[in-house]
Image (cartoon, rainbow, N blue to C red):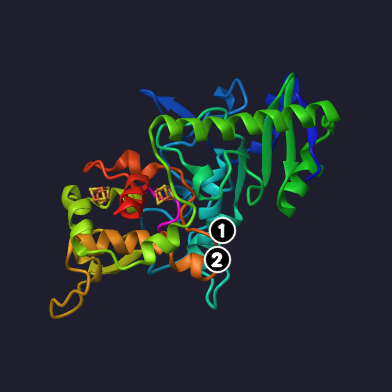
Amino acid sequence: MNWLFLHSNQILTFVKSITDGKLLIVPVLIEGSWHLQAQNPDSINEFPNSPFRATESLKTFLFIPAESVGGEIPSEKETVIFGAKSCDLPALQILDKLFLEGAFEEPFYSERRKKTIIIAEDCSDCLPSCFCVAVGNTPYPENTADLIFSDVEGGKLVAAATERGEELLKKHGGSFSAATELQLSEQKEKRNAIKEKVKISLQEQKIEIPENIAEILQKKWPDKIWEKIAETCVECGACNFVCPGCHCFSLTDELTSEGKALRTRVWDACLSENFTRVAGGANPNKKREVRLRHRLERKFIAPYEAEEGYACSGCGRCIDACIGKLDMRKIIQEVANA
Ligand code: SF4
Ligand code: SF4
């Protein structure tokens, strides 16, 4: 990557010039949690970033929870999202593959994705639920985002990871200079330190995630283990909804009071009993433990067999959101030790 340096006194000018009339989404600290929210560019006083990932993933803005898909494709406003983290980006690759690269390009996602600039930055801290390093990810972005930022003494290092990012730097990067060897080694040091911090956080919580997750989950474990694990699941679907990579949806059709047909796409959740229920009431995944196991298999076995790595980036959102206190790291550990 070609790293450039932006002095701290140029940062705000850069943020404002890149935003220029677009919708701006930034991380905002609300009651102790970071949330991605629309913000007036004039109210920004510093580079918009959070120490770790926000509660919402990028999915919330690109593949929105409920939308009308029966009519015209709306023209979306150009948007800039600051504060994406490394654990958001593999999920974006999953959504892009599914909605943009198949035989059929999904026009609603495509319209938003093409008009959204993604700016990512290294994590400087981690949450107890973070486990990116245990699933082959890093706490610093290396691809997919248009621009990637790292903190260094006196400013930021920035690199483009897409063609759009290159164009942005050409257009708005007048005040950048080439990164020095010293700055690059400072970046390396900081990146190693945050990686180590995530590992130590896992050790302190006594969480040991084995490397061969796919092999462990592939074994035929007695149903009793899964029954016990799934005991506290209340089927709220929060784990699916907060996951940056979960993308299942259902379509509902209704008549409005004016007699117009309305087709709506809404996020669906494989933890819900209705997810696989078909006409006549048959349901191959009627049992809760089967559904829970199915979710883990979809995250760790199917993509692994297709040589695509894991479909889980270790963001930990499903752990924080689970009302039943289910923690997929501990589930894997429990199954491995069974
Ligand atoms: S968040 Fe927890 S309780 Fe809710 S469906 Fe997922 S596993 Fe079950
Ligand atoms: S499965 Fe959980 S930890 Fe993995 S990417 Fe989804 S929300 Fe994050």
**Mark 2 lies within 8 Å of ligand 2 (Cβ measured):** no
Q: Main secondary structure of the magenta part?
A: loop
Q: Please state which of residues 275 and 207 is positioned toward the viewer in this rendering.
A: 207
Q: Quadrant of the C terminus?
A: bottom left
Q: Residue furthest front?
A: 337
Q: 59 left or right of 336?
A: right
Q: Position of residue 251 (x, y in %)?
A: 31, 68
Q: Residue at x 82, y 26 (%)?
A: 182
Q: Amino acid at mark 1?
A: Gln
Residue wearing tag 2: 97
Q: Amino acid at mark 2?
A: Lys
Q: 279 left or right of 69?
A: left
- Distance CA(mark 1)–CA(mark 2): 6 Å
Q: Which residues are magenta?
A: 242-246
Q: Residue at x 68, y 43 (%)?
A: 147
Residue wearing tag 1: 93
| Above-or-below relation of 276 to 152 | below
Q: Position of residue 103 (x, y in %)?
A: 54, 78
Q: Quadrant of residue 150?
A: top right
Residue 123 drawn in magenta: no
| Above-or-below relation of 16 to 80 | above
Say few, some or many: other residues with alpha carbon within 10 Å of mark 2 (under 14 / 14 to 19 / 20 or more): few
| Above-or-below relation of 22 to 31 | below
Q: Quadrant of the N terminus?
A: top right
Q: Position of residue 45 (x, y in %)?
A: 60, 20
Q: Position of residue 151 (x, y in %)?
A: 68, 27
